């Protein structure tokens, strides 16, 4: 028996990194997974990996800034599998890094991908999760949403919004639907490389930043994609049936400092 047997889950940004790891872990635990991402080729690779292991998955292209895509992925989940139990809103966008030179367009895109899009996908998924008898909604926030990050105040603003939105939604949607978020720290993912290499970064600066990151983490390593995937699995499954409204750090003890 898997921990997500007979569950149907949508996972956004599931083409690579933590999203892909989560899709694989959810499928191994019995979930039927709707893999969604803006990258069609890599998203299909995730589906192929799941099927190779004997799991069940489909791919739906989703740009979280397009409302029609959000409607489409919910519809595809229900049309294919008959219901929706779990939504893992993992999509995110690193940066932008400027403050003085930040454009309104950059600000709007960052807040749309990190906060507005995930909110509206949640809202569109709600009727189906209710129809299934309740379930779990998970967002990916960040340690940058809990304490802030000098690398990108805009990203911190979006992820900070996610953390408090989760608290509000947990109050609003209980007891039928639980709402939580995971807050990864620095990670071995493509997104993390973008954080460490804003425009103008030299190789020497990159090396210095990498050393600084590891030195600040008590566990002395960055977050692996599977670390985040198993945290999300816990919040998705019935073992966390009495947990809602939390922001769960997955950071190797970074916030303890």
Image (tube, helix red, strand yellow):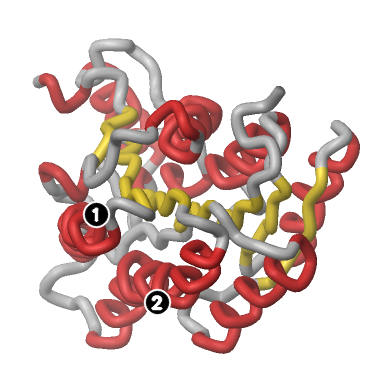
Q: Nearer the viewer, residue 92 or 59?
A: 59
Closer to the eye: label 2 or 1: 1
Q: Is residue 79 left or right of residue 209?
A: right
Locate the C terminus and report the quarter of the image it occupies. top left
Q: Is residue 253 left or right of residue 235?
A: left
Q: Is residue 36 above or below residue 179?
A: below
Element under label 1? helix
Whole-percent x, y for residue 245 in the image? 23, 46
Whole-percent x, y for residue 34 in the image? 69, 58
Q: Nearer the viewer, residue 154 or 230?
A: 230
Element under label 2? helix
Whole-percent x, y for residue 206 in the image? 36, 37
Whole-percent x, y for residue 23 in the image? 64, 43
Which of the 4 quarters of the picture holds residue 52?
top right
CA gap, disc 2 and disc 1: 16 Å
Q: Residues within 10 Å of mark 2 (few under 14, many from 20)?
A: some
Q: Is residue 66 left or right of residue 215?
A: right
In the picture of the structure, the residue carrying the numbered disc 2 is 120
Instruction: Indicate which disc, 2 or 1, sits on the residue closer to the N terminus.
Output: 2
Q: Residue furthest top?
A: 219
Q: Residue at 69% of width from left, 51% of height from top?
A: 33
Q: Residue at 82% of width from left, 39% of height from top?
A: 55
Q: Is residue 47 above or below residue 12?
A: above
Q: Residue at 62% of width from left, 36% of height from top?
A: 4
Which of the 4 quarters of the picture holds residue 44?
bottom right
In the picture of the structure, the residue carrying the numbered disc 1 is 170
State whether residue 13 appears in this view: no
Q: Residues within 10 Å of mark 1 (few under 14, many from 20)?
A: many
Q: Is residue 8 above or below residue 129?
A: above
State whether residue 3 appears in this view: yes
Q: Nearer the viewer, residue 55 or 201?
A: 55
């Amino acid at each position: 028996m898997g921990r997500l047997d007979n569950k149907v889950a949508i996972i956004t940004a599931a083409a690579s990194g933590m999203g892909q790891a989560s899709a694989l872990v959810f499928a191994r635990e019995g979930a039927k997974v709707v893999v969604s991402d803006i990258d069609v080729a890599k998203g299909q690779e995730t589906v192929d990996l799941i099927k190779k292991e004997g799991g069940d998955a489909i791919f739906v292209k989703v740009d979280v800034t397009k409302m029609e895509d959000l409607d489409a992925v919910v519809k595809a989940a229900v049309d294919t599998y008959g219901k929706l139990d779990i939504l893992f809103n993992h999509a995110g966008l690193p940066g932008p890094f400027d403050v003085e030179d930040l454009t309104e367009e950059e600000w709007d895109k960052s807040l749309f991908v990190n906060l507005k899009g995930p909110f509206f996908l949640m809202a569109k998924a709600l009727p189906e999760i209710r129809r299934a008898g309740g379930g779990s909604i998970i967002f990916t926030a960040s340690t940058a949403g809990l304490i802030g990050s000098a690398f990108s105040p805009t990203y911190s603003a979006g992820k900070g919004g996610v953390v408090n939105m989760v608290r509000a939604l947990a109050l609003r949607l209980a007891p039928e639907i639980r709402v939580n978020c995971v807050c990864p720290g620095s990670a071995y993912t493509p997104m993390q490389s973008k954080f460490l290499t804003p425009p103008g970064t030299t190789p020497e600066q990159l090396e210095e930043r990498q050393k600084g990151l590891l030195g600040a983490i008590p566990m002395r390593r960055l977050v692996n994609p599977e670390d985040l995937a198993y945290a999300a699995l816990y919040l998705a499954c019935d073992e966390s049936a009495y947990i809602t409204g939390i922001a769960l750090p997955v950071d190797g003890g970074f916030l303890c400092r």
